[in-house]
Amino acid sequence: KNEVEQSPQNLTAQEGEFITINCSYSVGISALHWLQQHPGGGIVSLFMLSSGKKKHGRLIATINIQEKHSSLHITASHPRDSAVYICAVSDNYGQNFVFGPGTRLSVLP
Amino acid sequence: KAGVTQTPRYLIKTRGQQVTLSCSPISGHRSVSWYQQTPGQGLQFLFEYFSETQRNKGNFPGRFSGRQFSNSRSEMNVSTLELGDSALYLCASSWGGASNEQFFGPGTRLTVL
């Protein structure tokens, strides 16, 4: 069983739709990160969470430590949101990253 | 503030050669981590350096090594290249490590022929 799992693997949405990407993990963590990777490779850190909920523009990230689950929500999706979204956790010592397999999102105009 | 820079951006090598990749972190960041990304394995953690010391290492063979200089710039070296080492190599810097926000460089795309 992978330590970090994401669902769905692939997601196609129409512009304006509300999108949810899920991440579940099996190890103890000090923080959970949501990353965005556009074609060409560049990775941008969207959120870092250790509890609760964070919001940045149209993006919202939540984490439930007891259930070892996090969600990334995109409201009013736009074609520029098309990217791979990666969930990563840092271990209890805060020194090691374990990555999920990524969710490939395509938002159609 | 300048972002994380990596050089070179693209590299083509042949099997058996060695390669050195460079990463310059954001000014003030003391932690530099290296990652390998391949289509088959996704993103995998290679190692992390903090104040010139390797603090943690992923599950990679000894052919993969690195170091960090006093100005926090880091290099990684891969010796005796294999075809399977073809990948995008990313570095990320942060103030303190994996529990802090990570700032990624653009990556070095290595092709081994």
Image (cartoon, coloured by chain):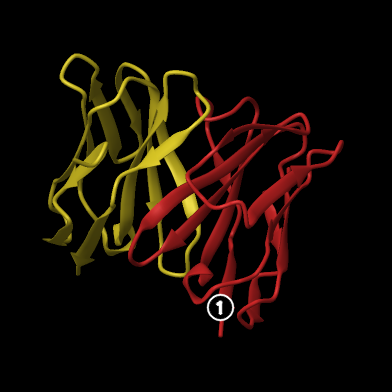
Query: Residue, x 31% and y 50% (percent of image)?
Result: A85
Q: Amino acid at mark 1?
A: Thr
Quadrant for the N terminus of chain A in the image: top left
Residue A73 appears in the picture as rendered: no
| Residue A18: image location, x then y, percent | 14, 46
Quadrant for the C terminus of chain A in the image: bottom left
In depth, the one of B8 and A54 nearer the eye is B8
Q: Secondary structure at mark 1?
A: strand
Q: Residues within 10 Å of mark 1 (few under 14, many from 20)?
A: some
In depth, the one of A43 and B90 nearer the eye is B90
Name the residue furthest right.
B70
Q: Quadrant of residue A82?
A: bottom left
**Seen in the image, is A67 located left or right of residue B89?**
left
In depth, the one of A76 and A87 nearer the eye is A87
Residue B21 appears in the picture as rendered: yes
Question: Numbered disc 1: what chain?
Answer: B
Query: Residue, x 22% and y 53% (percent of image)?
Result: A77
Query: Residue, x 25% and y 60% (percent of image)?
Result: A104
**Would you place residue A53 above or below residue A37 in this image?**
above
- Count of numbered circles on the image: 1
Query: Residue, x 29% and y 25% (percent of image)?
Result: A27
| Residue B26: image location, x then y, percent | 71, 41
Q: Which chain comes out yellow in the rendered image?
A: A
Q: Which residue is mark 1?
A: B111
| Residue B34: image location, x then y, percent | 59, 48
Q: Which chain comes out red in the rendered image?
A: B
**Seen in the image, is B104 located left or right of residue A109?**
right
